[in-house]
Image (spheres, grey):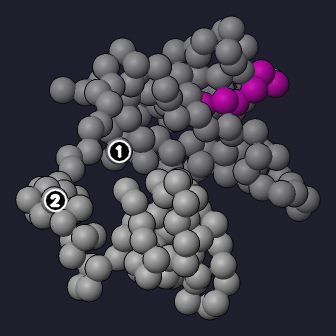
Amino acid sequence: MSYSKGDMVSVLDEDITGTVVSAKANKVTVETEDGFLLDFDASELVRITHGNAMLDNSIDTKNIAAIVAEKESVKRKTTKRVKPKERAQHALEVDLHINKLVPSTKGMSNYDMLNLQLETAKHKLEFAMAKRLQRLVFIHGVGEGVLKLELETLLRRYDGIKFYEANYQKYGLGATEVYFLQN
């Protein structure tokens, strides 16, 4: 596009407008609104006419409605389908070690510690049943086996569950896995 002296132009990639002072081949000298003289390539400029008719013609008004409609349309979120086998791989793990439940056992008897551990197990068991979880793992440790025996006694009181030793590779001998039988 050729420019002549006195044309109003705007720079494409910058917020600069001004008047053409001289135009030689592809080099155009523009006096900005602030009074600076700047040189630009002819391809970097756009001629401004009254009412910006030149700019208005460069925008396709038919596509604007389509673009607005596309932006306003509600896009449906896609959710990843989880297979039952993958869902069953993750289980809620509850560590019943006393040092994980309270900051200090000072002033607590063995009876108090065991009751706290069993109450925690009972609470987590009922939570898992309410949330319809498939599996729950109680980490109780090996020790003398008192907590494990009491935990098994607690689990026998519930219908609709199976319990057994948890995965040996992951937990060792000190964990019991509870499986909830669901319809």
Amino acid identity at mark 2: Asp
Q: In the picture provided, is 73 more to the left or to the right than 94?
A: left
Name the outermost residue toward the right.
Answer: 106
Where is residue 109? Give x, y as percent. Answer: 83, 52
Image point 50% across, 50% down: which residue? Answer: 123
Question: Against 23, is 50 above or below?
Answer: below
Q: Which residues are magenta?
A: 138-143
Whether residue 14 is visible, yes or no, is no
For disc 1, the marked residue is 131
Q: Amino acid at mark 1?
A: Lys
In the image, residue 24 lies at what x, y percent?
Answer: 55, 60
Q: Position of residue 67 (x, y in %)?
A: 18, 57
Q: Is residue 125 magenta?
A: no
Please provide percent x and percent y for residue 37.
66, 79
The residue under the point 37% across, 70% down is 47
| Image quarter in which the N terminus is found | bottom left
Q: Which residue is mark 2?
A: 60
Main SS, magenta region, reads loop
* Marks 2, 1: nearer the viewer: 2
Residue 55: image tag: none
Quick one: label 2 or label 1, which is nearer the N terminus? Answer: 2
Callout 1 secondary element: loop
Q: In terms of depth relative to the viewer, which is nearer, 101 or 2?
A: 2
**Could you say which is closer to the camera, residue 16 or residue 43?**
43
Q: Label 1 neighbourhood size at 10 Å, few (<14), some (14-19), many (20+)?
A: few
Taking depth in this image into account, of 22 and 138 the one nearest to the observer is: 22
